[in-house]
Image (spheres, rainbow, N blue to C red):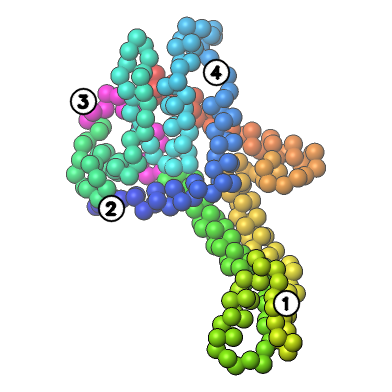
């Protein structure tokens, strides 16, 4: 509590985002919101001028960073210079350097003294998104990604051990040089495709008879993917598996409810934080 530091947590988040399935699910949820049409209302009518004012790259960047806070937790967003009614840039201040519990931006990870960004004049071009104590959805995704990586790692080890048949060379020779030559031949038999042996020598190939052992690892990886899909999109039918039309429609409705909630949340952020 005295010296909060989330750098290890964010290192795990970076690891989690290297997972192709999780990254895809996050993008699927965000794209629906950032790609949706929008308009600025004044009273009951649409203001075309104000709506056009937001059809700029900086506004798209802001929406992306704001939505990221759902997954990463608290975000401190800084706006660049305002020229002719348009911000020149919008960027996220490195989460590793932000201590939201104390309202400080530090120069390097581990510092406990820094710039009090909630005070003037530093707060002029800053917007805080989310609760300072919010750690985002990725905190629940990280364990699933780690278990999935472990399953694939173990699967890889098994493939290395049992994926190829074991080559056994039976020989009566005890000569060290001859045995070394036969060992070299056995280790290269896959690439050479042939062997020259004594009449008393024999080569055997021992195949693994357990042909479905991979299912243990595959099912664990699939299960982790399903949990990630449920966490991010609330369902699995749209992204993970084929299903009947009726079931797919139910899954799609659930996903749309998540996205509509994101839109309402982003609308409030824009109305009550960005506009002021």
Task: Please say if the residues under marks 4 and 1 sit with CB atoms less than 8 Å apart.
Answer: no
Residue 119 pos. (x, y %): 22, 30
The residue that disc 1 covers is: 205
Q: Secondary structure at mark 4?
A: loop
Q: Position of residue 241 (x, y in %)?
A: 72, 47
Answer left or right for 101 relative to 24: left
Q: Is residue 98 magenta?
A: no
Are there few (<14), some (14-19), or many (20+) residues within 10 Å of tag 1? few
Which quadrant is the C terminus positioned in? top left
Residue 101 drawn at (x, y percent): 30, 43
- Residue behind mark 3: 121
Residue 33, relative to residue 195: is it above or below? above
Residue 242: numbered disc: none
**Residue 85 visible from this viewpoint:** yes
Lower position in the chain sequence, tag 1 or tag 2: 2
- Report whether 11 appears left or right of 259: left
From the image, tell me which residue sits under label 4: 38
Q: Earlier in the sequence, mark 4 or mark 1?
A: 4
Label located before the other in sequence (4 or 3):
4
Q: Residues within 10 Å of mark 3 (few under 14, many from 20)?
A: few
Q: Secondary structure at mark 1?
A: strand
In primary-sequence order, the first of circles 4 and 2 is: 2
To which residue does mark 2 refer? 1
Q: CA distance from mark 4 to mark 3?
A: 32 Å
Magenta highlight range: 119-134
């Amino acid at each position: 509590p005295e010296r909060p530091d989330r750098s290890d947590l964010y290192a795990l988040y970076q690891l989690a985002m290297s997972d192709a399935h999780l990254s895809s699910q996050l993008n699927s949820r965000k794209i629906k919101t950032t790609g949706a049409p929008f308009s600025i209302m004044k009273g009951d009518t649409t203001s075309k001028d104000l709506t056009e004012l937001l059809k700029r790259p900086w506004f798209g960047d802001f929406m992306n960073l704001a939505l990221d806070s759902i997954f990463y937790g608290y975000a401190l967003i800084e706006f660049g210079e305002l020229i002719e009614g348009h911000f020149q840039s919008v960027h996220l201040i490195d989460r590793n350097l932000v201590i939201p519990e104390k309202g400080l931006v530090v120069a390097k990870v581990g510092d406990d003294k820094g710039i009090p960004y909630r005070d003037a004049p530093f707060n002029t071009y800053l917007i805080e998104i989310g609760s300072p104590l919010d750690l985002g959805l990725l905190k629940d995704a990280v364990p699933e990604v780690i278990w999935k990586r472990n399953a694939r790692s173990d699967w890889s080890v098994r493939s290395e051990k049992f994926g190829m048949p074991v080559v056994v060379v039976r020989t009566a020779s005890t000569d060290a040089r001859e045995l070394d030559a036969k060992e070299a031949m056995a280790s290269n038999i896959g690439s050479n495709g042939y062997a020259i042996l004594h009449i008393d020598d024999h080569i055997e190939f021992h195949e693994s008879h357990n042909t479905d052992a991979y299912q243990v690892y595959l099912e664990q990886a699939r299960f982790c993917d399903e949990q990630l899909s449920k966490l991010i999109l609330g369902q699995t039918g749209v992204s993970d598996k084929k299903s009947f039309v009726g079931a797919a429609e139910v899954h799609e409705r659930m996903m749309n409810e998540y996205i509509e909630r994101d839109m309402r949340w982003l609308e409030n952020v824009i109305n009550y934080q960005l506009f002021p």
